[in-house]
Amino acid sequence: MLLSLSWLREFVPYDGQVDELAHRLTMVGLEVEEIVRPFSHLSSLVVGRVMEKKPHPEADNLSLCTVDVGGSECLSIVCGAPNVARGQHVAVALEGAELPGGQVIRRTRIRGEDSQGMICSEAELELGQDAAWIMVLENDSEPGASLIRALNLEEYVLNIGVTPNRPDCLSVFGLAREVSAIFGLPLQKPSLNLQEDGFTDFSSEVQVVIDDPAGCPLYQARLISGCTVKPSPGWMRYRLLAAGVRPINNIVDVTNYIMLELGHPLHAFDRRLLEGAKIRVARAEEGYRFTPLDNQERGLNARDLLIWDENKPIALAGVMGGANTEINNESTEVLLECAVFDPLSIRQTARRLGLHSESSFRFERGVDQLGAPFSLDRAAQLMGELGSGRVARGVARSEPRPYSPVQVMFRRSRANSLLALDVDREYCSRLFSSLGCQVGEEEGDGFKVTVPSYRPDLSREVDLIEEIGRIYGLDRTPEHLPRVQKSLHQEEQNQEYEFCSRIKAWAAGLGLQEVINYSFVGMADLDLLGLPQEGRVRVFNPLSEDQDVMRLHLIPGLLYALRQNLGKGNTRLRLFETARSFKEDKNLETGVRENNRLALLLYGSRYRMHWPYTEADADFYDLKGLVEHLLQVFADDPGKFAEHNEHPYLNPCASCSIQGRHLGFLGRVRREIAVTCKARKDIWFADLDLDALHVVFSSVQPRFQPLPRYPVVKRDMTLAAPLNLGYASVLEIVHSARVPILEDAALVDIYYPQDRQEKKLTLRLTYRHPERTLQDREVDAEQQRLADLLQKKLPVGFP
Amino acid sequence: MSSAQEINASLKSLIQEFEEILDQASSLQEVEEARVAFLGRKGRLAGIMSKLPGLDPHDRPQAGRTANQVKSELNRLLEDKKKVLETKSRSVQDTGFDPSLPGRIPDVGSLHPVTRVVQDICNIFVGLGFDIVTGPEVETDFYNFEALNLPPGHPARDMQDTLYITESLVLRTHTSPLQIRTMEKRSPPLAAIAPGKVYRRDSDLTHTPMFHQIEGFLVDTRVSMADLRGTLTAFAQRIFDPGVKIRFRPSFFPFTEPSAEVDISCVMCQGRGRVHDGTACRVCKETGWVEVLGCGMIDPEVFLQVGYDPEEYTGFAFGLGVERVAMLKYGINDLRMFFENDLKFLNQFIQAGHR
Ligand SMILES: [Zn+2]
């Protein structure tokens, strides 16, 4: 809401600083977002007086003017407007001045004649629509004076963010009420001096029929006849401009002016285009089509409220008038509507049709039904004055749902305890009165408050308590730390945040860098990765195509981060992200399974690229090492890894599981996908289920074992195995042998002979007896038993 | 027979001689030779000491003390010289030793600035006794709007541009649904904070379609505005600095009443509106204040939704934007950087946090 200071001062005599006003409004919840000077772009223009006017010798339609702009010498200016005349006061743009459209005035020669400036039209100054004629000022201004000072436009406008609960503050007068309450200043109501005209009562001429009383509790209309449609006078146009509303003509401008002043939207119909003697308010029908003032036909449904004459719809109630009954330059008879509509209905129609107007904005929030007659009368009076018309006697109206006053019980003790204040009855009662409430007799420690009709937000005690806090100043209430109490028996604790924090600390500690990506990606990203169609969670109204589906896997975000970084020359990345994946699951409350996951991405050099590290790129075992480290730290378990050949975007790929729970996959991003990130090297990527790991983590707890007292015996065993034999199967046999004194088996070397026909694995076996020192022959025997078993179960030999 | 003075003099001169010899010595071998010559069993000191018994019994104790002092002084000189030579010999022998060469630095990881700020904030509130709760990011219309006193058609729904999954399912536009979910699951007294991702259909210089919020709420009997103000003042002073000022502006949220927006004194210009060189502060647009969060006393309607008696219980709630806090705390001037994940950005946050 744009509030012009001069307009405000018509209703409340605030004479302090604009900054102070802005601050106080902000501190009562009417946030002043900006203080603007709406006409400051005209500050370089000056008043000029045309001293002499001669025809241009070379062009019939141009004049040579001598203009006094206050300097010692007059300027000569070439002017093309037909209305320029000697003795006129005009708006002059001097050399170097910039017009609102961006044009900078230069000294030029026009058809051989010197022109030292420009005499401006209203259109050039964006003060009106008249582009052909120059703007002629009142004759009382001094040549050379500032134009905006001469026009009284040197004013401040406050841009106020009005919260949706305060429709009463969507008007100058409403804001004046607040200013009056804040500063304790008297409030002056707008003047009303309506002269009705004619013998017949307009209410007997036109009948108002409301089919939908809930949709339209009040409809009233007046007739202003014999009007002349023309531009509004300057003062009105400037006020509208300062309030951000484009002036159109004197009739439409009055409706806007009153809306800005009193907050009630009005609409003007051309009476001669209305058929019959009836105005009806009724819903549309499904499939009905209607063309509002913007000349774009819209399809309606049965929930849209319309205004009708005897034969046709003439307006989308509260949203926009119809093109069929619009005021035009030939209109003389104006039917002026001032009604109250159901906020919800207006909102639905405005939203569905994408037709948001100043009018619908106010109706959606609620207008003042009790104030409606005053708004109508004041608008009619003003329209009569500016349009040289006569306001017909009487009002055509119907009010099927009269306003019923709202009474709220207020307890001082409740207010004081909620706000931590100690305000007395006198204070509360004065405060409510200053806000337009009526305060009743004392009842207990409180009283009944009848709230004003323009404050729909005050319907409960807590709303009144808020008013106390708001006007007293929330910033002045006391403050202390609360005593946080909790149940002795703590209910179910949510550990998700804590577990994710531990994971993040682990990852950062291992030298990985955290990234955060959007939770949505494009369908095309998922397609590229070969992910299934089913289970995807689509965004119904995405901002763009590349954000139209929730992440099914985390990988698209990390590949995006990789691509961005490669583009910026960062060629070594060790990234991690913890985030949720989203998959459709109809059995869940929200229909979506959200799964916390950990993604790891390694790209480029294994080590930092400096001495004493040697150059080598990260490989599968770097990635697997991280995952194994994770499993050891969080589950004290080595986990199980197995080759997996059907992964959509990883190849080679291993699956990872722990204690029978599948955790995820790790491997190399397929080359055809890697190239889309402009990656020249292998991208190593893991995607693991943190929720599953969390379950294991929660079930594991260290258990003390007595420390061994006897020494170990270590023996190496080298076996030759075919290339395709997995290490896991060797280990499995070793463990299956259940050698009681075998404490550990570790792979210490792999050797690939020249011919590459087989590989040689060296295991280091650690033996220990818990109760005595082992003898060599016992160890030899077990070592032999293991070797025999391996040879029996696997195609291995002992070189 | 020597006099006490003679012995004393020869003891004193011993120190000077020893110093001179050590000065000349360039190897541990030479030092060892000097040690034998002076401190050895047949060395100079032993020679002088052997004369002590011949002294006048009166003078003996004094001479003995002097001899011992000289002995420890000689030993000290010897050790000092050895240290100097050892240090020198190491760098001379291992010519490759150069402590200024880089070590094998393990990779240095980092937490995203959003995570850092979330953790800082959560730690503050955990310290005040709040629990941490989490909830779904795809949320029902009921929890995201209706239960928070935002029925369908409420104009306040326009305050947040919503991304929908279906007609009744949204990407949560705030962390406030956690108020409802937590109150449904537990009973008062309760105090919790809910960090998480939230989504809006908005993307420009100052908005990203995904960002992070932290919701906080406390419900008990007799909770007042003073509790809310105190909590948020403590929070602001701990997350920014103890001198930061805080201001409560009345505002409107459908799920709190009274509602307020909270500004802190601008951390860039210390609330002066102008930075050091006198130019206008861009962060606070010269106002000296920056909005950081919205808050209020929980609306009775919300309590009715979860079956709490609004006459018995009161509470407060607040919601703050993490990126906003991070921008102020670290001086980040472009919101979009948070989600571009440029290493040159992330590398600026490798230092371990303070809390
Ligand atoms: Zn500042």
Image (cartoon, rainbow, N blue to C red):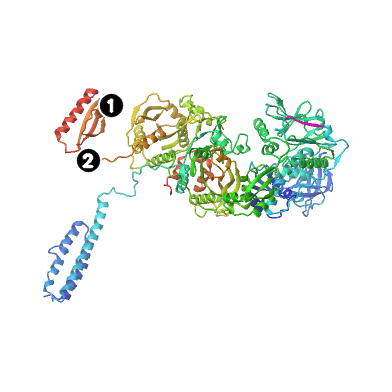
Instruction: Report the front residue among A91 and A509.
Output: A509
| Dots 1, 2 in contact, CB < 8 A | no
Give the extent of the magenta segment.
Answer: A206-211
Tell me if residue A321 comes above or below residue B189 in the rendering.
above
Residue A400 % position (x, y): 74, 34
- The verdict on label 2 being within 8 Å of ligand 1 is no
Provide the residue designation for mark 2: A708
Is residue A207 inside the magenta stretch? yes
- Going 49% across and 47% down the picture, which residue do you hit? B330
Three-letter amino acid code of the residue under disc 1: Ser
> Which corner quadrant of the image does residue A457 belong to?
top right
Q: Main secondary structure of the magenta part?
A: strand
Label 1 vs label 2, nearer the camera? 2
- Going 79% across and 27% down the picture, which residue do you hit? A310
Instruction: Count the numbered circles shown.
Output: 2
Does A92 sit left or right of A575 as displayed? right
Provide the residue designation for mark 1: A729
Badge 2 sits on which subunit? A
Three-letter amino acid code of the residue under disc 2: Pro
Instruction: Report the front residue among A718 and A681.
Output: A718
Instruction: Report the front residue among B31 and A560.
Output: A560
